[in-house]
Image: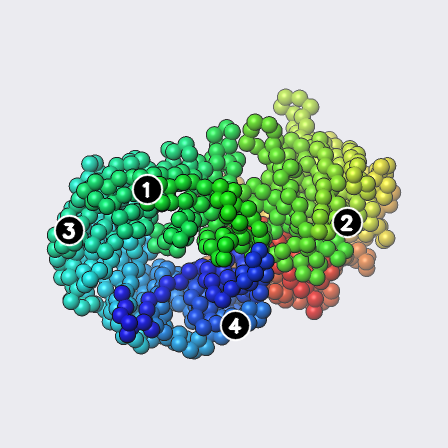
Amino acid sequence: MASDGDAARAIAEADVIQVEDGKLYALSQYSGLSVVDISRRDRLTLLGRYRASGSPFEMYLRDGVAYAMFSSWAEHPFDEATGSYSSAPMSRIEALDVSDPADIRPIGSFDLPGAISDSRIVGDVLYAVSFENGACWRCASAPNTTITSLAVGDPAHIRVVDRLSFSDDGFKTHGFRRSVSATEDRMVVAGVAWDGAGEGHSTLEIVDISDPGGHLVKGASVEAVGQIQSRWQMDEHDGVLRVISQPGIWRSGAMPAVQTFSIASSDEITPLGYTELTLPRPEALRSVRFDGDRAYAITAEQTDPLFTIDLSDPAKPAQMGELEMPGWVYHMEPRGDRLFALGYDDAAVEGALHVSLFDVSDLTAPAMLERVHFGGDRGSFAEDQDRIQKAFTLLDDLGTLLVPYSGRKRAPDGDLGGCGARESGIQLVDFSRGALTKRGVAPARGHARRAFVHGDRLFAVSEEKVGTFDIDDRDAPVETAGLTLATTVSNAVATGDLVVRLSADRRSRSATLEVASAADPGRAEPLGELDLAELSSGSAGDCHEADLSEARLFAHGQAAYLLWPSYDRWKTGLAVIDLSVPSAPRIASRRELPFGGGALYPYRYHGPLVAAGDTVVQAGSTLMIRTTQEHREGSGALPSHRGWLEILDLSDPTSPAHRSVALPEGEGYAGLLLDGTTVLTSHWAPLPDDPARARFYLDRIDVEDPSSPVVRPPVSVPGSLLAFDSASRRLLTVDYEALEFEVTDREACYGAVAHHEQFAPKDREDRDGPGTCRGTRRAFKLLEVGDDVARLLDERAIDDGTAIAQAFVGEDRVFMLTYGNRTVSADGGYEFKYPALVVSGLAEGRIGVAAYESEEIGHVVPLLADGTRLVVASAQPPAISVLDATDLDDLTFERKGELSSYTYQDPVTVSGDSALCSLGQYGLEVVDLGD
């Protein structure tokens, strides 16, 4: 411990929360740093927020400055030479001025290669420990653990004082990072190391940090006989370094050993004492804790012995007592002659997690006084072993333990997988010298991480929410206030001055519909919300339920519409939500529809066919869904398909009407497009005299009156539907022609035909020799469509080396991202090109084709077409960009805004010039698409 004269250099540890002057500072992976006013009882107010691109690690709070540490902070520098962005992940320390929480500003920063794994502040020096895997950005070529000392007295000018690296090359770390034990004079760094042979051991690297200015001095290297897996296995006390470790990796028959070393200085450390623990059977060392002249060690296989160790004579460490118990202990907290412990026991029917109380007044006869179980059938604690003490809170004045946890209960069929019910919260346990009493749980949304008492309220902090609880009745904590830090958004649509958000969490299988203002659609706290639990329930007595995270969301006027696959997948759920009172949305009606939920999601691949449209389209308060079913006339017959247009009239929110219209039978169906109130699709059917060829038809259904839809006769057209304009009656299609030709080798086939190519060598023993190449040639065709006949106006061939998988239809613009098979470059390597094509012609009566090619366009995912622009998502960095085709002679590509997370699997919708980007647990972010 520091002397009085060293008070300014007292050691401090970081955490994910800090409480100071009536404010809570909380780091969340999904919302960054939030500052919350907690000074008024049961009134939580968000004072400010700072969003960052990295994953928060921990932070320090000093004199109005938060030193927030982030891992996986990704910079994306632009390379002018290649015209592309690259990824440069690193760790970062951000100095944030939080003196005005409403205007949090970065005032300084420092980047660290690799991933930050631990830190300490001593005086005005921050010691950061980072792990470099040898392949990270700006990392050394070989894996290493690096200590960097940073002067942080002036937060605007954080600077490196010194660096010291320890090579991790030459042994296997098995995913473990080195642990750190520290005093104000020195740090001890050690971790799991094994060269693949023998029992393995760990080297404790001693680093002198006694210099107030932050200069590092490498001290002695101390050999531990076994592996160091947590900070608690190392401890310095009264000039003696104590270590408990076990040789071997994973499972070992070797005994754990206690080693002591005399510390004359950081570079003069000598062996002092040694003893091996005697185990009743071969077991693995699970946890260790030192306490003054005592130590406690836990080993486990199926039972969990607690060993007590006397270190009063450090030259002669002595094993004193042993206590066997079920399960195993993860962490221990000494309190004089009592020992509290957190642990696991999957076999316990009362709960997989437990808190135990031990009497260690007599080291020769430790006794377990009480154990309480909680956490469901499978549970986890909030932190790893190096940081768990920050989450395990003992309130001595209240006689209460607070344990953040997450758990899962078995479903009725015994399943612990996707159907098991999840729970998360703060378990309260009362304690005295002789007993533990399990009390209630303060529930948390998301993964509970911290708990503390402020005033007379319990605070529960998770990644997603801060909640306060009245714990006068500790058996039944009552939530008195809550503030959302982050909300899961799986889909969002705008209607009028509102944005409707679907918050469906796969982990907890919970779902909520939230209503937000269109002026601030990403605000975590909604205007109103509706629990959708009643929509997702399965059949009685089983674990199956509908997954609303797969629901499709629509809105019109003062109503929102949800469609989702039912739990048995053979039916589809429909719910109409009344939004007339935004603060209190309610279910106006719900019903089950007689078709499978698979119809809600477009199947994009039809061999060489270009997919366009969707399986669900909306015209005001009417939804149309295309459903299909495979059909065979008899055994051995080729399959055909039957299709239907399911029409949902939702004009009366309290009484949805469903009508099914049969589509012509065919071999397959294109997606749905909407032109005014006319729904368009196309189908194809094999020719009677040549089943290898097919004829395409345009299908049109007018749903202006959804109770009496008008089905127009199919019109034979060349190719599948791309786009249609009812005013001009012009239709754009893609037509297909089978190709077959001889080539000299496989590469010649792949270079000539870019899609659905097949190569058949003449000699099966020589697959690289000459053979037959088969593929598909395609062409754009423009037609004028009458009531029963179509007339060709124009056509344009598509290069055989260009492949198109999917088309996105805007206003007289069809966007297609292309890909081509590999071609051999001059240096013998392969080249790939990914230009974007834009096709027009509906307005002018002749086909126009423009191409845009760049390095970046080849690495985006198309999301939707909006008017004359294509909205796309990129990964490096996560961003929304627009390909603008207003002028076909001058296509432009522009990045419109970066995002906190990727958008590949999450929907993006457009309202005016705003892209509403649903980012799952990262919430809803809005990107301005305007000029």
Disc 3 crowd rating (10 Å Cα; few below 14, some 14-19, many 20+) is many
Answer with the quarter of the image where residue 820 lies.
Answer: bottom right
Q: Nearer the viewer, mark 1 or mark 4?
A: 1
Q: Nearer the viewer, residue 791 or 319?
A: 319
At 18% across and 49% down in the image, what residue appears? 310
Question: Would you say the residues marked 1 and 3 are in contact, meaning their CB atoms lie under 8 Å apart?
Answer: no
Question: Which residue is depicted at the point 32% across and 42% down?
Answer: 434
Amino acid on which disc 3 is placed: Pro
Front-most of residues 291 and 672: 291
Q: Pointer 3: what residue?
A: 317
Q: Secondary structure at mark 1?
A: loop
Mark 4 residue element: loop
Q: Is residue 610 visible?
A: no
Q: Quadrant of the N terminus?
A: bottom left
The tag on residue 99 is: 4
Q: CA distance from mark 4 to mark 3?
A: 51 Å
Give the residue pinned by disc 2: 580
Marks 4,3: beta carbons within 8 A = no
Judged left or right of residue 668, residue 621 is right
Amino acid at the residue labelled 4? Ser
Can residue 291 be seen from the camera position used here? yes
Of residues 327 and 670, the one nearer the viewer is 327
Q: For marks 2 and 4, give the one nearer the viewer.
A: 4
Q: Give the total number of marks visible in the rendering.
A: 4
Residue at label 1? 434
Residue 602 on image: x %, y %: 66, 43
